[in-house]
Amino acid sequence: MTTLHDFHATTLTGEDRDLADYAGKAVLVVNTASRCGLTPQYEGLQALYDAYAGRGLEILGFPCDQFAHQEPGSAAEIGEFCTRTYGVTFPMFAKVDVNGADAHPLWAWLKRERGGVLGGAIKWNFTKFLLDPSGAVVRRYAPTVAPATLADDIERVLPTEGAPPKETA
């Protein structure tokens, strides 16, 4: 069975990251953009990270320029914007495609695991996927779902020492 831990991705600083590094953690994967009406969600994502990182949550941000050219910047510009404007400290990755023939393999897999209202396609920036500590996709959230509303679902999948991950609906 394929899981998050079978993939690699490039960080904003150009390093290859084995996503198996996140084994044993609850993970929220999000496609992001700096010039989108939903960009203020970075603040809510960071609040979730601040609240739950110490309990085993990772948030992985993947900038994407496929929706109305709302992420035109370079890796350095994206990193600077996220840090300066929203104080982002969660891991950010290099810009990727989430739809189409050039979609990053992680995103192709996420869409197969949890389709959305447009079938498998990602509708817009800030689509979110919650994964449990085993790397399995638990839930997909529409772009307009505010990060704060994910707290209960995150609580259910946070790792518990010595116990298997909790099931969610």
Image (cartoon, rainbow, N blue to C red):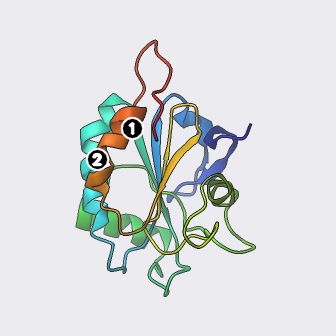
Q: Residue 96: name its quadrant.
A: bottom right
Q: Residue at (26%, 53%) from the top-left corner?
A: 148
Asked if the residues shown at circle 1 and circle 2 are in contact, with their CB atoms under 8 angstroms apart, the answer is yes
Q: Residue at (35%, 63%) from the top-left corner?
A: 145
Q: Residues within 10 Å of mark 2 (few under 14, many from 20)?
A: many
Image location (x, y in percent) of residue 13? 51, 57
Q: Looking at numbered disc 2 in the image, what kind of residue is underneath it?
A: Leu
Label at residue 48: 2
Image location (x, y in percent) of residue 80? 34, 67
Instruction: Choose between 78 and 155: the one closer to the eye.
Output: 155
Going from the N terminus, do you reach mark 1 or mark 2 first?
A: 2
Q: Residue at (52%, 72%) from the top-left corner?
A: 64
Image location (x, y in percent) of residue 123? 52, 74
Q: Secondary structure at mark 1?
A: strand
Relative to 165, say whether 32 is above or below. Answer: below
Q: Looking at numbered disc 1 in the image, what kind of residue is underneath it?
A: Leu
Q: How many numbered marks have been drawn onto this rendered protein structure? A: 2
Label at residue 69: none
Q: Residue at (42%, 26%) from the top-left corner?
A: 159
Instruction: Choose between 68 and 93: the one closer to the eye.
Output: 68
Residue 101 appears left or right of 62:
right
Q: Residues within 10 Å of mark 1 (few under 14, many from 20)?
A: many
- Pick out the residue farthest to the bottom: 68
Relative to 144, say whether 169 is above or below. Answer: above
Label at residue 57: 1
User: What's the distance in space between the residues labelled 1 and 2, CA to CA?
Assistant: 9 Å
Image location (x, y in percent) of residue 60? 46, 51
